[in-house]
Image (cartoon, rainbow, N blue to C red):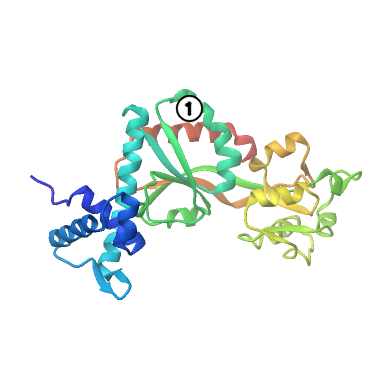
Amino acid sequence: MRRKIPSTQALICFEAAARHESYTRAAQELALTQSAVSRQITALEDFLGMALFRRTRHGVALTPAGADYARQIARQLDTMERDTLDAMARQGLGGSLQLAAVPTFATRWLIPRLPDFAARHPDITVHIETRTRPFLFNETPFDAAIYTGTPAQAANWAGTRSTALLSEDVLPVCSPALIAPRGQLSPAAIARLPLLQQSTRPDGWRQWFDAQQVEAPRARSGPRYELFSMLAEAAAHGLGVALMPRLLIEAELDRGELVVACDRPLRGERSYFLVTPAAQDERPALTLFRDWLLAQAGGDAGVR
C-alpha cells in the first residue's frame, strides 16, 4: 500500500520556510529560487488540505496548524538525517545510540569508561547530549537517558522503564590547603567552614549534618553552583567544603586536588538510572549498552 507521505523536497522547503518564516530566506538557504520554494509549499498545502502559512504585510507567518506541523516535521527530518549519517559512517553494521545524560556523570564517570565499550563493540557509536530533566521520548531522537533522581521520581517518568545503576553516596571534600595541617575534621568543625551548595539540592548539607547529629545553623548558607563539576572546581580552589558523590571526583582525589574533609559518607536519596521508552522493542545495540553499563556499575560497588 502506498504511504500517504508528501515529497521530501516539499518537507525540506517547508521546514526551512517555517524556521525563517520567509520564503526568500528559505530559498537562499536551500540554493533555490523563491518561486520554487513557494511552489513546493503550495503543493504541500494541497496535499494536506490545509493552509500552513498566511500572508502578512512583511511576508508570511505560520498558521497555528502550520506551526504544529513544523515542529513535528523538524524532528522527523533531524531523525532521518541522523540515521542517514549513521548508515554512511557505519555501513549499517552496529548502528548508533542517542543517549541523554546528566552532564557531570557523563563527563566524569561515563565517558572515561566508553573506550572499553568501544573496544568490545566497535560497530556501535554512542552519541551523548546533556539533559537534566525528564522529557517525552517520542518528541526527541534519544534511545535512552541516564537520569539521577529518587526511585519514586524514576518510576513516575511517564512511558518509561528504569534500570538502577549506582546509588549516590555523598561526603564532604575540599582543597587540602583548607584543612592543613589538621587533616580530617569532625562534623562540628565542618559546620564552621564555608559550605558550598548545589542549587538543585538545597537540603544536602542539612541532611548530612542531621545524620551526624550536629547543629549547623549555616547548613543552607554559602555560594550555590548548578552542577557537580562546578562544585568540584570551587572546592579544589579553596572556596569551601563541598558535599560530593565520591564516584564523580575519583580523579581529583587521586591527584590530590581534593581531599576528604570528614570520612562519613551519607547514602543519598538519589541514584543513577538508565531510562528507556517502555512502549517499544529494545534495539540490540541498546541491550548491549545496558549490559555493559550494569557491569561497569557493579565494578564500582565499593563507591555506591
The residue closer to the viewer here, 193 or 264, is: 193
The residue closer to the viewer here, 10 or 212, is: 10
Instruction: Tell me the quarter of the image containing the N terminus.
Output: top left
- Report x, y in % for residue 281: 29, 41
Residue 138 visible in the displayed image: no
Q: Residue at x 77, y 40 (%)?
A: 257
The residue closer to the viewer here, 150 or 129, is: 129
Residue 158 visible in the displayed image: yes
Q: Residue 38 lies in what quarter of the image? A: bottom left
Residue linked to disc 1: 118
Q: Residues within 10 Å of mark 1 (few under 14, many from 20)?
A: few
Q: Residue at x 51, y 31 (%)?
A: 295
* 179 relative to 119 in the view: left or right: right
As drawn, 97 above or below 279: above
| Residue lying farthest to the left in this orientation | 1
As drawn, 208 above or below 184: below
